[in-house]
Structures are given as structure tokens and as C-alpha cells.
Amino acid sequence: MKKYTIIILSALGMLALISSCRKDLSLAPVSSITDANYFQTAAQFDAFMAGIHVNLRANTQAFQILGENRADIFGTDPGSGGAFTGEATQGQERLWQENLNLDNPGVSNYGGFYTNINQINLMISKLNTTTLIPTATKNYYLGICYGLRAFYYYHIYRTWGAAIINTVPTSGSTIDIHNLAMAASPQAAVMTFIKADIELSLASYGTDYSFKNTKSYWSKAATLMLKGDVFLWTSAHGGGTADAATAQAALTDIQTNVPSLQLLASYPSVFATTNRGNNEMIFGIRYLLNEATASWIQTVYVPQTGLIANFYDSLQNRQFSVTTDNWGGLLRAPTLIKAYRQFSPLDTRRTASIQAAYTKVGANYQIAGCFVDKYQGEQSGGVRNMTNDFPIYRYADLLLMIAEAKVDQGLDPSNEINLVRARAYGANYNVTTLGYPHQTIDANPKEAILQERFLEFIFEGKRWYDLRRMGDNFVYEHTALLPANSYALLWPIDRSTLQNNTLLTQTPGYASF
């Protein structure tokens, strides 16, 4: 029988593992753990589930890049440049310039997603044969596994189209796409597989709508959000009103059975490190001081401390400070000034999401550039640590997906859109001027929803996917991708992956080798 290497990367998972090993001295050393000497206690199942979620956290940067960095958010535009960023883009520009190829693929090795898919497959196989854990826990864990596997494959589907579908755990210490040596299944088969896994997840959860680990574990509500997302995609790509109705039913299921979910009164408080697992959050990827930080934000999206101190915050009429504004970053993907200007000055999401930086000549401010400010982390020992949870699904997303499902069915989306707008504008909100359908953009309901999602979810890894879901024309309208290059709606497979798995073929339209 094959032995499968156990990958548990988290401090949480390793602590649970060490604790369980102390109770069972017959286990092999941690460095040689395989399925043959693991899954011997309930605590080990718990530790493995923690490891699956930490592997998920390791993929967060890939989720962000795939979901947003090709869209109309990042880049350099008139008024910004080297004097502001201080860094070269180092290939980041290929994403927003729509200039990817097999040697510059944006994301390689399918984002590393198959490593965790393999671990999920192993967990499913063990859960289906174990008697060590209570039935309720077993079913909840199966709900997590099927839901997360569908979530991974949905990313792969939206990015590369075709995908290797594998449900059998593969042996080896570094499981990735190279080890599978399998051909990819076509897009239609991948979507069928995603929908099947969603239903397996929901069936496993049954009537259990509970959240675990302050909403940092996948839940039934997360699977229902994914179902809504998936069926909105297929609704816009041939499924029509029937799929839109299915999406709406999944989302209203959450509203009915998890009544505690709601919009928070304050937009910035949704992301605060002191407010984890709040009533708006449905599922988020957990970061904690002294455990793991989202350091990838600092390597690409925020500026150097010394450099930003040369600029000004015009709204607060102050120069940035090395002490308090110590972003400690490398700004290789600046936020576009035009992205900042899409926000009304009355919209509280503007300053909660993007920081504008200005030069000052006399008493006059001139914008120099912008950068991400949604995740401010926390200060520790004079160092800024990016420890905000990264939202995957939250209640505002549920509302705007219901609005989209209603539009797809020819129904009125006013209620859901206006709930989101009212929170965004706060005391400035006037339904007769700012509410739907009274803004100019509301003449096109899909554009209205796209804009609202842009303003609400910027830097949550959603914009590129939103444009793709709505339809190809929206991609061409809002990004640098041209209709003549429609093949590039999907992403190229990198050279290394193609060389190591000769059964794979390059995404149509891109050169192979």
C-alpha cells in the first residue's frame, strides 16, 4: 500500500500534532510521518484539518493575483512613477498590461493548489474509513474538504479552464502538478466536478450551519457562498435564469439559517485585527501575530517606510511619519490614481481602502500616487505586521451576489445594492441621489453591480473574476485586454509545468515551447 506524506505547516497544527505524539510514543518521528503512522487519534485528525487551512493560507497571494492583479486596479499612470514607488515593477506590469506567456505566466505550477488538493483527498479517504472521531465532527470535516476542493478547482477553472481532476491522494513529499502525470479534463467536466463537490459538501454538513475557529475554518455558509458564485458564473455563460435562481436560493439559504450575519455599521471595522470573525465575515483566511503574517502585501503593494516619509496625506494635512507610517514595503504594484478617483469623496470605503500620497508645493497638494491601505496590520516592536484576516466571503458579497442573481432574472436589485451603499456613505447617504437606481451608472444594472463590487471589495481578490463572470465584453471594457486577444481571458501554463508533465497541453492561444 502506498504511503502518503503528511504536510502540516501551521503552528496550530504542529502544536496539536506534538501534543498527540506525546500521548502515543509509538509514533514515528515528525520528520517521517506518513499515513501509515498517522490518523491514529482524533487529535491527529484535528491537527491535519488545521494543516489543510494553513496550506490554504499559503495560497492567499495566488488567490489575490489571480483574482485581481490583471484588472483595472494596479499600475502606473500620469502623476506617479519611480519618484513615488522607489521600486521597479519586476514583471508585475505584465499582469495589468495583459502580456503573459509561458515564461512570464503570472502564477506558476497552478498556484501550488494541487498540494492542498492532494492533502484534502487524503483527508477524505481517511474520514470515510475512520471510527475514531464523532459522526458530527466527521461530517463537518467532510463538508470542509469537499467545499475547499471545489473552491480550489473553481480558481483553476476560472484561470486555466481545463484542469487535472484528481480525487486519489498521490504519494510523495512535494505533491504538485508535476507528480500527477495526467492529462487535463475539459472545462465542462471541471465545472461538473465543482458542482458535484459542492453538493457533497452541503450533504455532509446537513443542518449544521455552525462556524469554527472564529470563521477561519470553511463552513456550510462558505459552501453556499461558493455555490452562489459558481451558479452566477454559469448563469452568465449559458445557464440563464435557472442558474441565477439556483444561486439566489443558495444565498438566501444563508440569510434564513444564519440570521446573525449582517453588515457592520463601520466599513473599516470589518477588517480590524481586533474584530476577527465579526458578524459580517463568513469565511476569512487567518493571520496572527507571532504565527503568520501576510508579508506578501509588503513585498508588492505598500511603500518603503523611508520613501513614503517624503510625501503627504492631504486629507489630514500632514507629512507621513517614519514612526507611525512604517509600512516597510516594496511598492511594485501601485494602486492606480484613477482607481482612487472612482470613489466618491463621500464614500467611507475610499480612505479605508486606498491611501493617496501627495507632493506639496507651497500650500498646494498634487497627487503623486496611491497604495493599498485596507490591511493596516498591527505594530509590534516598531514593526508593522500584516495580521489582518484576508476575507474570502462576507455578508456584503452575499448581498451583491443576490443583486446580481436578481438582475439575471429580470428582478429589482435595489434592496441589496442600497444596503451596501447606505453603509458605505453613512451619514452622507441620500437614497434619492445615491441609492439605486438614481446614480448615472444604474442605467446599466450590471455595470452598477460591477462598480459597487469594485468599491466594496477592492484588494479582496475579486475584480478580475467579477469581470470574467459578467462576460467577456466587460473584461475588454475595463482592462487592457483586447478582443483580438480573447484567448488571454485564460492564463498560460508555465514552461516548467509543461516540461514536467508532458500529458498537459498549453492553454490555447499561447506559445508552448
Image (cartoon, helix red, strand yellow):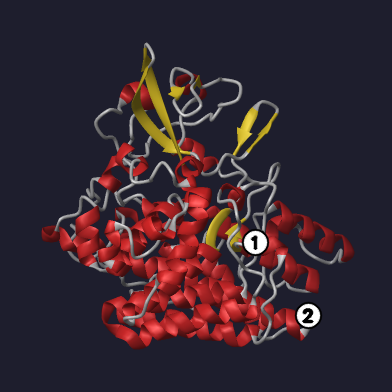
* Residue 41 in the figure: left or right of residue 447: right
The amino acid marked with disc number 1 is: Ser
Q: In front: 298, or 396? A: 396
Q: Is residue 189 above or below residue 482?
A: below
Return the x and y of residue 472 as percentages of the image width and height.
22, 66
The amino acid marked with disc number 2 is: Ile
- Which mark, by number, is residue 5? none
Q: Residue at x 61, y 40 (%)?
A: 377
* Residue 42 in the figure: left or right of residue 89: right
Q: Which tag, 2 or 1, sits closer to the chain's start?
A: 2
Q: Residue at x 36, y 30 (%)?
A: 369
* Residue 507 in the figure: left or right of residue 405: left
Neighbours of disc 1 within 10 Å: few (<14), some (14-19), many (20+)? many
Outermost residue toward the right? 23
Q: Residue at x 67, y 86 (%)?
A: 207
Return the x and y of residue 430 as percentages of the image width and height.
44, 55
Question: Considering the numbered disc 1 on the image, is that residue within a helix, a strand or a loop?
Answer: loop
Q: Quadrant of the C terminus?
A: bottom left
Quarter of image, res 46: bottom right
- Answer yes or no: is residue 227 visible: yes
Q: Is residue 463 above or below residue 183?
A: above
Return the x and y of residue 211 as percentages of the image width and height.
69, 70
Quarter of image, res 503: bottom left
Q: In front: 163, or 323? A: 323
Return the x and y of residue 232 as percentages of the image width and height.
38, 76
Question: Considering the numbered disc 2 on the image, is that residue within a helix, a strand or a loop?
Answer: loop
Q: In front: 339, or 30? A: 339
- Residue, disc 1: 216
- Which mark, by number, is residue 133? 2
Outermost residue toward the front? 432
